[in-house]
Amino acid sequence: MRPANGFVQAAHATTEDSRLDDALAAVLSKAGFTGNIQRMFEQRLEANLGRSVDPELANLGRLLWFDKIHSLHRDNTWASGIHRAYRQLLGEVFPEMAAGAPIDFCMFGKAIAEFEFTQVFANAPIDRFARGERSAMTPAAKRGTLLFFGKAGCVQCHAVSGRYSVGEANEMFTDFEERVIGVPQIAPFFGTLPTQNRPPSATNAVL
């Protein structure tokens, strides 16, 4: 009995996907791309701080940053009437306040700084793929990545590893070197251009 055509197509697609995954995994491994750059950043931050980021303090900072409770009056007059929800959160994070100390601006600064410490994002689909999550990237993205590391030669400048004159390349895809890439200037320019060569929207504005 011959299998249904749809079954054959599905089996073929699965085989092709597997080959694509294997090819990309091999290329990333050869390039030294691990997908762990975010953890490296976190470890470096923890080493500089001498501690781990405090999630409760960071969450308080997030609330203050976006001010979802809308009690800061948009003019920093928070001390005269801060919302009881913030008072409770501050008391949970700062023991001295729970013991009766007044709210001060340093508490706000510490909370917001802790939130800013969490703003490290290096967990793109390619990172997740490199860590073993094969479904993190679409087939088109996988093929594009193979081009990036292969025939297109992008990785020659967007390096993953190696020491260069101004820094150590890493998985953020840079060797930190300045390059002339031949892209036409589209920002306002200095001086003037001959009328016949001037684009319709161009101005003589100085940056």
Image: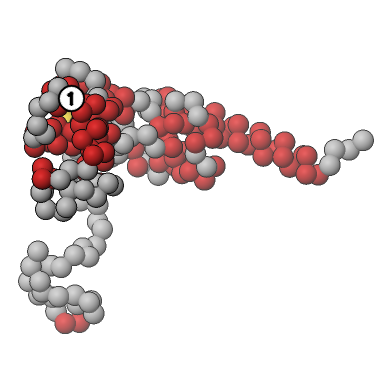
Q: Which residue shows up at 63% across the image and 36% down it?
A: 16
Residue 103 image offset from top left, x and y in percent: 11, 34
* Residue at the spot of label 1: 98
Q: State the image quarter where residue 63 is shown.
A: top left
Q: How is the image coloured?
A: secondary structure
Residue 110 visible: yes
Secondary structure category for the residue under label 1: helix
- Point 10% across, 71% down: residue: 205
Q: Nearer the viewer, residue 130 or 100?
A: 100
- On the image, the x and y values in percent for residue 43 come to 25, 21
| Quarter of the view holding residue 159 | top left
Question: Is 160 left, or right, of 16 in this rendering?
Answer: left
Q: Residue at x 8, y 37 (%)?
A: 105
User: Residue 161: in sight, yes or no?
Assistant: no
14 lies left or right of 44 = right
The quarter of the rendered structure image containing the N terminus is: top right
Residue nearer the viewer, 139 or 100: 100
Amino acid type, label 1: Ala
Give percent across and percent down for residue 176.
19, 38
For residue 191, above or below residue 125: below
State the count of labels: 1
Residue 56 at what x, y percent from top left?
27, 28
